[in-house]
Amino acid sequence: MEIKSAEFVISNTDVRKCPEGTRPEYAFIGRSNVGKSSLINMLTARKGLAMTSQKPGKTLLINHFLINKEWFLVDLPGYGFAQRGKEGRENIRRIIESYVLQRPQLTCLFVLLDCRHEPQKIDLEFMEWLGENEVPFAIIFTKIDKISRGRLTENLNKYKERLLETWEELPPILLSSSETKDGREEILDYIQSINR
Ligand code: GDP
């Protein structure tokens, strides 16, 4: 898929204030620092579209970007901020849950995982919760330029094994590097292939 246009539309914390209409939405979520903003900027080929971690502020919000005047790319708040305290984490959880459960336009939620890390409880539990609520999702392993092919295969296998402890079938798995733009075509083609 070619990205012809990408425009910021609205940021908010209330799912009821998200854009009206029936355009399909593809949302991105992951732990803070997983590389979500870099990936969104890489996919849309717009450098400052999503704010990276260095510029906090918009990271607590549901951000809608209109792509090719056809679909929305949605940047969701990062979860698992240790430094935000219990109340902050509860607040983020509420924002995420209300969007994910109350937004019928959500066509696929991309769960981002840093390919360098061991499977983390918080991510596994989040995906389990998605499954219980029948939310369509796919995994994107980020930052694949940071490790060797061998290490990558090893880490992916570890993740798949852990997932198969609770899942009968694996979700779609994609790989990306915002540094080398690896995975860009695959992710955009995947979005196009499931576009309703
Ligand atoms: P966010 O908090 O999930 O939005 O993460 P950012 O996009 O701000 O990225 C966190 C850090 O990881 C930044 O220093 C990025 O430059 C770096 N980063 C993100 N993606 C990649 C990648 O694909 N490759 C490499 N080498 N670094 C990355």
Image (cartoon, helix red, strand yellow):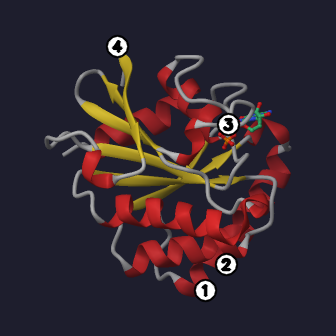
Secondary structure of the residue carrying tag 2 is: helix
Q: Which residue is mark 4?
A: 4
Separation of disc 1 and disc 4 at Cα?
41 Å
User: Could you classify mark 3 by the number of other residues whose Cα lies within 10 Å: few (under 14), some (14-19), or many (20 or more)?
Assistant: few
Q: Which residue is mark 3?
A: 56
Separation of disc 3 and disc 2 at Cα?
33 Å
Q: Judge: label 3 CB < 8 Å from ligand 1.
A: no
- Nearer the observer: mark 1 or 4; the answer is 4
Q: Quadrant of residue 71?
A: top left
Q: Which residue is mark 2?
A: 162
Separation of disc 1 and disc 2 at Cα?
5 Å
x, y percentage for residue 32? Answer: 69, 50
Mark toward the start of the polypeptide (1 vs 4): 4
Q: Judge: label 4 CB < 8 Å from ligand 1.
A: no
Q: Which residue is mark 1?
A: 165
Mark toward the start of the polypeptide (1 vs 3): 3
Instruction: Say which amino acid is labelled 4.
Output: Lys
Instruction: Say which amino acid is labelled 3.
Output: Pro
Instruction: Say which amino acid is labelled 2.
Output: Arg
Residue at the bottom extreme of this rendering? 165
Q: Nearer the viewer, residue 98 or 111?
A: 98
Q: Are marks 3 and 2 in contact (CB under 8 Å)?
A: no
Separation of disc 4 and disc 2 at Cα?
39 Å
State which image quarter holds ligand 1. Answer: top right
| Residue 83 sits above or below residue 124 on the image | above
- Nearer the observer: mark 3 or 4; the answer is 3
| Residue 88 sits above or below residue 5 on the image | below
Name the residue rendered at 54%, 64% in the picture: 91
x, y percentage for residue 194? Answer: 28, 47
Mark toward the start of the polypeptide (3 vs 4): 4
x, y percentage for residue 181? Answer: 63, 26
